[in-house]
Image (cartoon, rainbow, N blue to C red):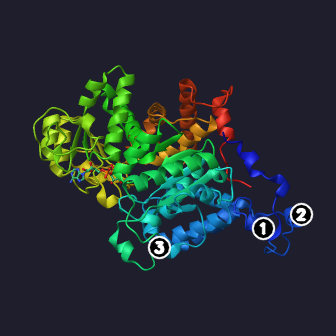
Amino acid sequence: MISKSLEIQSHGGVNFPTGVSLLKDSLRNKGTAFSAEERDALGLKGLLPPRIFSMEEQVERALKQFRKKESDLERYIFLTALQQRNETLFFRLLLDHLEETMPIIYTPTVGQACLEYGGIFRSPRGLWISIEDKGNVESVLRHWPNQGVRLIVVTDGERILGLGDLGALGMGIPIGKLALYTACAGLHPYYCLPITLDVGTNNEKLLEDPFYIGLPRTRAKGAEYEEFLEEFVAAAQKVFPGSLIQFEDFGNHNAFDLLGKWRDRICCFNDDIQGTAAVALAGLIAATKETGVPLRDQRVLFLGAGEAGTGIGELFVSALGEEGVSEAEARLRCWFVDSKGLLIKNRGDEMPKHKLPFAHEGEHVASLAEAVEKIRPTALIGVSGVGRSFTADVLRSMAAINERPVIFALSNPTSKAECTAEEAYLHTDGRGLFASGSPFKGVEYQGRTIHPGQGNNVYIFPGVGLGALCCAASRVDDSMFLAAARTLAAEVTTEDLSRGSVYPSLTRIRAVSLKIAKAVAERAYALGYAKIPRPADLEQHVAERMFVPNY
Ligand code: NAD
């Protein structure tokens, strides 16, 4: 379980650092905001310039410097340095200017930061554990200075965003995700540990680069990989008991295997599969308020049948199950087109396990346009990584079939989106309900501005993690993600919808995360997963555990 935020902030009161050590302690440093009394009492006199600034003034100054930088990568480096120096100020800046800073600390800039990680790496944040540490993973984990860790985000760097195998350079991802946990759900940074498992890389360019920071070997696979992952999970549970492990940006095959192996044994989840599923499902549920077509009457056609697509399909099936639809019937409401055409039984190719439950009886259909004509979907979801694959014809067909067609182009980055917001509105006569993975600006259409929503996982995973940790959950199961999705959908207001968005404004993210955390903890209690007695006021219990970045 995690403690009240204030208890952690004063954690270790006996050994409270002073002088230079305090200024180097990023969790306690206030920089020029230390008061005259604090400077006297804590041995800071002379170590700081004499003028004292308020936190508001510090934020203003930092923002000015941030905006002065000439490129997004430089802004990323600036924010990383600030985080290294003064986390309270870093998170205050993030939270107060989330729409401006999120694309820097996370996608799309974090992708570029990963590509250049070797060059911009300054000081350690997070642990690299390499396959050469096999047999000694526990001792490497014990090198982390803070043994109070409760939340681990881990990647093996094989599928970093849409950029593919970046090996050890993937570290930017767990760091960025954890920053979002703190900014968006108030998970105290004290509890957070980013980890990159370096099992090698199959990226030829990196293997040939003399300055590559990871192991210059090809990826471990088979038994070597599995034993290493097994050792890592067991050691993490031993060194940080009860911690939640979030698997992030693993390759498709390993992502499904790891989740299948651990989901019923420890507190863990995979954001690419389950977080994406919940955010997309929330968008579908919110859209029903506009389309008037209930969820149980939806027919969804997916382009792409990978981690994201089949993850959404599975959660959609669970949601329909809650509404009394049988599993077989619910699966028939989900159709997939992948790189080989419509997913049907006996297609003749060897299908991975995650696709099989969605392979229906049917005839071969090669193109998406044909599939739309045949399936007549109410919603079209793009998770293929293939840019501009929702052509004008496809969008026009959706508009001919539906009064309010639901069009989600979730592939990232922007260049990979299946269509742009503008195309979605143009080819559906402004009737489309559009959401995307990467942000799109508002679109002028026939005298009004439509502001599309972003189906960003940040609406889901921080709240899910916070909820699980606040009740010391032993598991995170799909019904908790379902609860998160329904809660998120309920937070979408008529104002959000009339602006064109099936998601709430990011300015309300903390309030939304709190509601999600409560709903997730509620499910954990109902399922018997929560390991602490249920507090009388669950929402207050969670709220008190949210870190507010103030001095
Ligand atoms: P994945 O590699 O597991 O799956 C990709 C799928 O697309 C595979 O089934 C593949 O067969 C299919 N595909 C490839 N080429 C195709 C083509 N030409 N036509 C039809 N299908 C094709 O990847 P993933 O993790 O499922 O991610 C897919 C995309 O979704 C990525 O671009 C990712 O950025 C995006 N995504 C978005 C969000 C979000 O917006 N919240 C979250 C997760 C993933």
Name the front one of labels 1 and 3.
Answer: 1
Does the numbered disc 2 mark a residue whose Cβ is under 8 Å from ligand 1?
Answer: no
Q: Is residue 55 above or below residue 533?
A: below
Instruction: Please say if the residues under marks 3 and 2 sit with CB atoms less than 8 Å apart.
Output: no
The secondary structure type at the circle numbered 1 is helix
- In primary-sequence order, the first of circles 3 and 2 is 2
Residue 161 in view: yes
Q: Amino acid at mark 3?
A: Ser
Q: Amino acid at mark 2?
A: Ala
Which residue is the extreme one toward the bottom? 210
Quadrant assignment, res 297: top left
Q: Amino acid at mark 1?
A: Ser
Q: Which residue is mark 2?
A: 41
Q: Which residue is mark 1?
A: 21
Residue 137 at x, y percent in the picture: 56, 57
Q: Quadrant of the N terminus?
A: top right
- For this view, does 458 lie left or right of residue 39? left
Q: Is residue 207 above or below residue 416?
A: below
Say which mark, if any, is on residue 71: 3
